Amino acid sequence: MVHMISQEPKIGSRMIRAARRMSKMLGLIVAAMVTTTVGATDFQSLAKQGYRWVLVNGPYACPKKEDAEKLAHSKNVADDMELQDKTHAYFLLPGMIVLVLENDSAAGLSRIRASGIVVDLWTQTKYLSSHPFKDTYGVTETPESTGLGQVGTEPSPSPFGPGSLNPNSNPSPIESPLPNESPLPNESPLPNESPVPNESASPSPAQQ
């Protein structure tokens, strides 16, 4: 009896430790499953909001829709420097997240907005994926990580309108005051001007 009593606590403690290990393992498995589910739900929600991930690397987007059509019909736009210059082509990078604002199914084009670019761009819809695509650093971009979520869906400025970065538009010199401009002479009093003699007070001569 003494021998059996001395063994029971050891067996019981082993069972408790094993149960604790099992509970920890189950907890880790459940946490991993929840994290995976939440991540997938987040990306699906972003896709429903119009966010897409770029699949290509090269100058495949431009501000004007008609120029985007020219890029789409080019056989090798990546090597056509003249076409890139004429269409004001912008580079797209793999894994870059963009917000789709408009789709033209007939032309196969989409109007997109990207973080860090002041104008909306047109590109081929087939270059965009609704599934997360990692960038060259192995990171999946999100609106929060790039600041794209703060841009919104309001119309962006025209690439050649007021406030644009068009290099050919120079401000007129009359729009800014000249820092060294001197006032007109008639607009300032003469510092050395002496008072009129007749206006100065003088004692009247004594009447006889």
Image (cartoon, grey):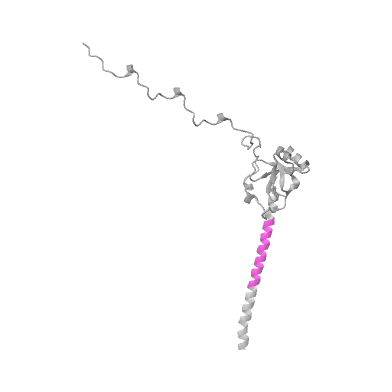
**Which secondary structure is most common in the magenta stretch?**
helix
Q: Is residue 102 visible?
A: no
Residue 37: say if magenta. yes
Q: Position of residue 155 (x, y in %)?
A: 65, 39
Q: Which residues are magenta?
A: 20-40
Vertical placement of residue 195 versus 153, above or below? above
Q: Quadrant of residue 123?
A: top right
Residue 164: say if magenta. no
Q: Position of residue 61 (x, y in %)?
A: 71, 43
Identify which residue, 67 or 84, lies in the foreground: 84
Identify which residue, 101 or 95, lies in the foreground: 95
Residue at the bottom extreme, as displayed: 1
Residue at the left extreme, as displayed: 208
Identify the image quadrant of the C terminus: top left
Vertical placement of residue 32 versus 54, above or below? below
Identify which residue, 176 or 157, lies in the foreground: 176
Q: Quadrant of residue 84?
A: top right
Q: Is residue 40 visible?
A: yes
Vertical placement of residue 21 versus 96, above or below? below
Residue at the top extreme, as displayed: 208
Identify the image quadrant of the N terminus: bottom right
Q: Is residue 25 left or right of residue 77?
A: left
Q: Position of residue 51 (x, y in %)?
A: 69, 48
Q: Position of residue 29 (x, y in %)?
A: 67, 65
Q: What is the number of callouts on the image?
A: 0
Q: Residue at x 62, y 81 (%)?
A: 10
